[in-house]
Image (tube, rainbow, N blue to C red):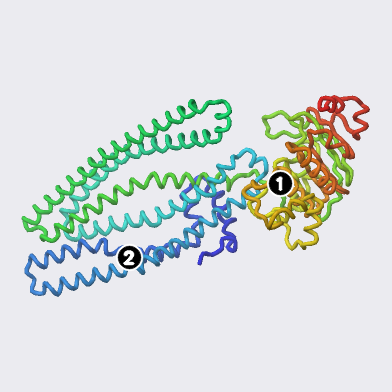
């Protein structure tokens, strides 16, 4: 049974190991397995026992040949004894292999689960800015592929290298105990044979790498072609697009052909080199046997051990790329686990209740030190329960203001006050329990409508849920579906329209009963009917709650208590819809353009 890494606080230990040994991936690997060494020791013991038929077979073969050729009077008894020993060891392989894999897998899978858990936990702690600067595909690769590479590295280091070392050591011990001359021959010729074979493999590996990269490039091009089919068809560019992809496919075929020829040629050359050395070993040991320096049966023993040693030395060098890749994956995982861009909440004031009054005092904010500030001395006051709409050109700073309200970012200069308290001094996690966000691009997961509405809320009674459904104008949709609230929405809510997804997002916000609402372009890119339904749902959502709305359609914010026109990171105009229209300033001009 694999222990739960959470119960052992393994995730925190892993993060500490990466921080402590961040410049030494090998030490990190050894450190994260601390506490599992006993399992590896048991695995090693069972591995030695289960692997014993491999290195015992040459000895038994040599013994039987020697018994027969020397006309030993107890020949058949000794043959039966050796055969019986081999059968016993072979049968013993099955239970020993089970226990070897059991203890090895318990250790490796525990660490594998703990590493993924540590990455997931760290990703939840890292700032939104970090996530915006990091491609989601790369993070997914670290959680899945890099951890898998570390698991492979662990197996190679604790099992494959053990296997190789065991085979070489036993072959050398048996050889040196029987003949110093043959041992000296092995020491001189084995490295030459192994290096010759590995050199050929290196060329093949290079061609394999070229072929893989060409395949990856072509795969990406094919995916791009599939996505562009509507555009291609609309402009009658089918022939041109097919020709472009065909050129990539021909290049793949040519690299594949060169790889096939090289693999065939060097494979046969490598085999020939190995066989030549085998023959040399055979001739050398036959010469020794002829001179009476070794027994005839020992020729077979040395032949088997010579082959074993050459193959194992070759395997060590072949493993180097796998080990290098695994150590690089350890570094890759470390890039996340040692990242310092973390939202700090420990020791800050916990917010038990929120009134919803916000004051922006000379707020300046920039996304990185080198960039120009997005907000430049912003001053703004929002009273409890007030709905404020933020309007302005793209890049003016509207979304940045929302990020400050949510606490995704903190002001570089000046301060943002929530109910008189600086956002920098409060535990943002406790504050967000009183907050709901409805983003422009609705985010749904592939569960049911019920699951998406009640996300993060437990023990919701059915009456409350149905009230929320009605307030979000979802009742007609729910009643039209055979499974009602238990209807699966599909990946990213793909089975629903944009308006339906947006109303589910509003229902998700409503059920949290928040005191602060953030709406980012909640009615963008919708038809007029969907917009009307959503606008009614928004009115139900924002009643008596402090609400921040970003909208480009100025007609949708007539009912806002106040409108702030944001220009160049400052509040250029502020007032009610009627006041700004009478002012005939920037808001008035924007409204005229949309009329």
Residue 147 relative to residue 408: left or right: left
Which of 545/178 is in front?
545
Which quarter of the image is occupied by the C terminus?
top right
For residue 439, side relative to residue 248 (left or right):
right
Q: In the rendered structure, find residue 66 and report the number of the disc placed on it.
A: none
- Residue 363 figure quarter: top right
Of labels 1 and 2, earlier in sequence is 2
Q: Secondary structure at mark 2?
A: helix
In front: label 1 or label 2: 1
| Residue that badge 2 annotates | 50
In x, y percent, where is residue 14?
55, 54
**Residue 353 visible in image:** yes
Residue at 8%, 74% (x, y): give it.
73
Q: Which residue is mark 1?
A: 501
The image position of residue 228, as x and y in percent, is 56, 32
Residue 512 shows in this picture: no
Q: Secondary structure at mark 1?
A: helix
Q: Residue at x 80, y 33 (%)?
A: 553
> Looking at the image, which is closer to me, 409 or 249?
249
Residue 118 rendering spot, x and y as whole percentages? 58, 53
Q: Going 25% across and 70% down the picture, which residue do you hit? A: 87
How many numbered circles does the render carry? 2
Locate residue 358: give its quadrant.
top right
**Marks 1 and 2, Cα distance to the nearest angstrom?**
58 Å
Q: Residues within 10 Å of mark 2 (few under 14, many from 20)?
A: many
**Residue 94 in the image, given as x and y percentages of width and height:** 34, 67
Q: Quadrant of residue 574?
A: top right
């Amino acid at each position: 049974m694999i222990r739960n890494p959470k119960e052992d606080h393994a995730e925190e230990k892993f993060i500490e190991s990466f921080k402590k040994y961040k410049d030494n991936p090998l030490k990190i690997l050894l450190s994260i397995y601390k506490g599992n060494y006993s399992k590896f020791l048991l695995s090693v013991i069972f591995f030695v026992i289960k692997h014993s038929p491999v290195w015992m077979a040459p000895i038994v073969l040599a013994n039987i040949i020697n018994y027969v050729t020397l006309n030993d009077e107890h020949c058949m008894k000794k043959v039966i004894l050796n055969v019986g020993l081999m059968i016993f060891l072979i049968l013993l392989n099955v239970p020993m292999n089970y226990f070897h894999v059991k203890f090895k897998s318990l250790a490796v899978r525990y660490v594998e689960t703990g590493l993924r858990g540590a990455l997931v936990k760290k990703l939840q702690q890292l700032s939104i800015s970090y996530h915006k600067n990091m491609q989601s595909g790369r993070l997914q690769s670290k959680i899945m592929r890099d951890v898998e590479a570390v698991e492979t590295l662990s197996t190679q280091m604790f099992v494959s290298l053990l296997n190789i070392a065991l085979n070489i050591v036993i072959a050398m011990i048996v050889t040196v105990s029987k003949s110093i001359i043959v041992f000296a021959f092995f020491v001189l010729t084995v490295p030459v044979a192994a290096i010759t074979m590995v050199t050929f493999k290196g060329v093949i590996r290079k061609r394999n790498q070229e072929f893989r990269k060409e395949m990856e490039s072509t795969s990406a091009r094919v995916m791009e072609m599939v996505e562009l089919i509507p555009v291609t068809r609309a402009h009658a560019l089918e022939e041109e697009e097919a020709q472009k992809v065909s050129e990539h496919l021909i290049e793949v075929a040519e690299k594949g052909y060169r790889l096939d020829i090289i693999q065939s040629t060097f494979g046969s050359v490598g085999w020939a080199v190995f066989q030549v050395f085998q023959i040399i070993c055979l001739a050398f040991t036959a010469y020794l046997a002829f001179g009476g320096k070794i027994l005839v049966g020992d020729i077979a023993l040395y032949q088997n051990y010579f082959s074993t040693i050459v193959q194992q030395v070759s395997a060590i060098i072949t493993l180097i790329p796998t080990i290098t890749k695994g150590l690089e994956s350890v570094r890759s995982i470390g890039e996340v686990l040692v990242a310092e861009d973390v939202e700090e909440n420990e020791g800050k004031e916990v917010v038990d209740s929120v009134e919803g009054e916000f004051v922006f005092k000379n707020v300046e904010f920039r996304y990185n030190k080198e960039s120009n500030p997005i907000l430049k001395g912003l001053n703004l006051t929002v009273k409890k329960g007030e709905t404020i709409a933020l309007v302005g050109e793209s890049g003016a700073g509207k979304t940045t203001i929302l990020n400050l309200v949510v606490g995704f970012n903190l002001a570089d200069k000046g301060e943002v006050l929530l109910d008189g308290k600086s956002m920098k001094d409060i535990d943002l996690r406790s504050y967000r329990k009183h907050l709901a966000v409805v983003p422009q691009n609705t985010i749904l997961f592939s569960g049911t409508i019920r699951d998406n509405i009640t996300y993060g809320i437990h023990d919701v009674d059915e009456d409350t849920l149905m009230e929320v459904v009605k307030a979000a104008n979802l009742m007609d949709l729910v009643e039209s579906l055979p499974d009602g609230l238990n209807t699966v929405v599909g990946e990213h809510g793909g089975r629903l329209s944009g308006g339906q997804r947006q109303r589910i997002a509003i229902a998700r916000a409503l059920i949290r009963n928040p005191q602060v609402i953030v709406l980012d372009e909640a009615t963008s890119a919708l038809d007029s009917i969907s917009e009307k339904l959503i606008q009614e749902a928004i009115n139900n959502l924002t009643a008596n709650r402090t609400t921040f709305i970003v909208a480009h359609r100025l007609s949708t914010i007539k009912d806002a208590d106040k409108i702030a026109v944001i220009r160049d990171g400052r509040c250029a105009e502020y007032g009610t819809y009627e006041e700004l229209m009478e002012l005939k300033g920037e808001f008035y001009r924007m409204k005229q353009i949309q009329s």
